[in-house]
Amino acid sequence: MTEKQEWEAVRAALRDAGVDPTDLARFVNAPNPAIRGLEPSTFDSRRAYPVLLEWLPRVQARPVVDTLASRIRASGKRSESAQALIAKYGSGRAGSSGTRSRAR
């Protein structure tokens, strides 16, 4: 599956679950509603959580993997989240490009 197909599949799964995928890959560090492009993100990570967990092991493109991982982390701390992230990033298959690094 190509990166584009992965994005489309994840967005379709989110829509099927009743979650608006519009801001899935949009992150705003310092929201400012007065400045266009810096409006707060409307993506609901908590409602999307089951879909994100389901899709994380299935995607391979690094941008998709990293986006899903960030949204899973944003949904709150849970052992289930940690296990999914460790499984994905610890496997050495976190994405089709780039290398993984280990803390020393």
Image (tube, grey):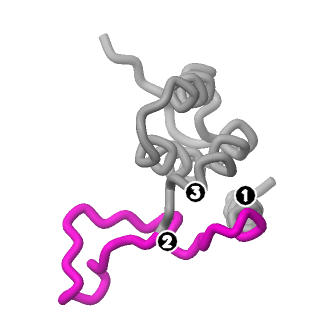
- In the image: residue 42, left or right of residue 6: left
Examine the image and state in which quarter residue 48 appears: bottom right
- In the image: residue 94, left or right of residue 18: left
Residue bounds of the magenta highlight: 15-42
Q: Earlier in the sequence, mark 1 or mark 3?
A: 1
The answer to whether the residue labelled 1 contacts the one labelled 2, judged by CB atoms less than 8 Å apart, is: no
**For the residues marked 2 and 3, what is the alpha-carbon distance in whole angstroms?**
13 Å
* Magenta residues, dominant SS class: loop
Q: Residue at x 49, y 71 (%)?
A: 23
**For the residues marked 1 and 3, what is the alpha-carbon distance in whole angstroms?**
20 Å
Whether residue 70 is situated above or below residue 77 in the rendered picture: below
Q: Nearer the viewer, mark 2 or mark 3?
A: 3
Q: Earlier in the sequence, mark 2 or mark 3?
A: 2
**For the residues marked 1 and 2, what is the alpha-carbon distance in whole angstroms?**
16 Å
The amino acid type found where label 1 is placed reads: Glu
Q: Residue at x 54, y 30 (%)?
A: 85
Give neighbour class at mark 1: few <14, some 14-19, many 20+ (Cα, 10 Å). some
> In the drawing, what numbered circle is on residue 6?
1
Q: Which residue is mark 3?
A: 47
Q: Nearer the viewer, residue 43 or 7?
A: 43
The amino acid type found where label 3 is placed reads: Arg
> In the drawing, what numbered circle is on residue 23?
2
Q: Secondary structure at mark 2?
A: loop
Residue 102: % across, % down: 40, 18
Q: Earlier in the sequence, mark 1 or mark 2?
A: 1
Q: Nearer the viewer, residue 18 or 33?
A: 18
